Image (cartoon, grey):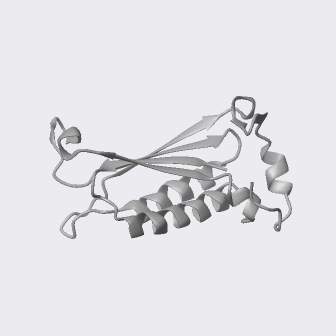
Amino acid sequence: MPTLIIHSPAGTFSADDRKQIASSLTQLGLDCESLPYSPLVISTVWIYFADYPADSVFMGGAPAWMPVVTLQIYVIAGGLDDAGKCKLIEGATSILDRRPASTSVAPVYVVIHEIPEENWGIFGHQADLTALRASAVDAPAI
């Protein structure tokens, strides 16, 4: 049940892009954490888009000349193994890549924050990754 925050210059993603990105990142995140793709678990994934004015984004001390994107992912510690982290970084980079065609390097930074389960609360209770993994595939959304 990752929580994702996408930081980017304003205008990087259209409303339609955001819907597709949110859907793709949700599926990728649940897959990487080995969580069921059920209405319940899907409803625990939150994605925020944080836009910044063009004059607030810099590369190497100068105004950014391309849409640099940073994705911060918050997950419960132990929810991702090394292969899952790699898959999440590669997949998210592909989903968020907005580089100009002439550029060979995608300016997407991915940061994974692992939060101890006892420090993750949802709806007034501590998170329980084991219970989410064992939840029924038809469990209703929250």
User: Percent position (x, y) of residue 131?
Assistant: 85, 49
Residue 13 location (% of width, % of height)? 34, 61
Q: Is residue 106 left or right of residue 40?
A: left
**Residue located 26% across and 62% down the image:** 99
On the image, the x and y values in percent for residue 27 come to 61, 65
Query: Does residue 61 sit above or below 20 in this rendering?
Result: above
Q: Position of residue 128 (x, y in %)?
A: 80, 42
Judge from the rendering whether residue 20 lies leftward or rightward of residue 39; answer left or right: left
Q: As displayed, is residue 93 above or below residue 16?
A: above
Q: Residue at x 18, y 47 (%)?
A: 64
Q: Residue at x 70, y 46 (%)?
A: 79
Q: Nearer the viewer, residue 128 or 141?
A: 141
Q: Is residue 131 left or right of residue 83?
A: right
**Quadrant housing residue 95:** bottom left
Residue at the left extreme? 62
Image position of 137 with respect to 41: above or below = below
- Residue furthest toward the top? 119
Quarter of the rendering occupied by the C terminus: bottom right
Q: How many marks?
A: 0
Q: Is residue 34 visible?
A: no
Name the one closer to the observer, 10 or 21.
Answer: 10
The residue depicted at 30 percent of the width and 63 percent of the height is 98
Q: Is residue 81 visible?
A: yes
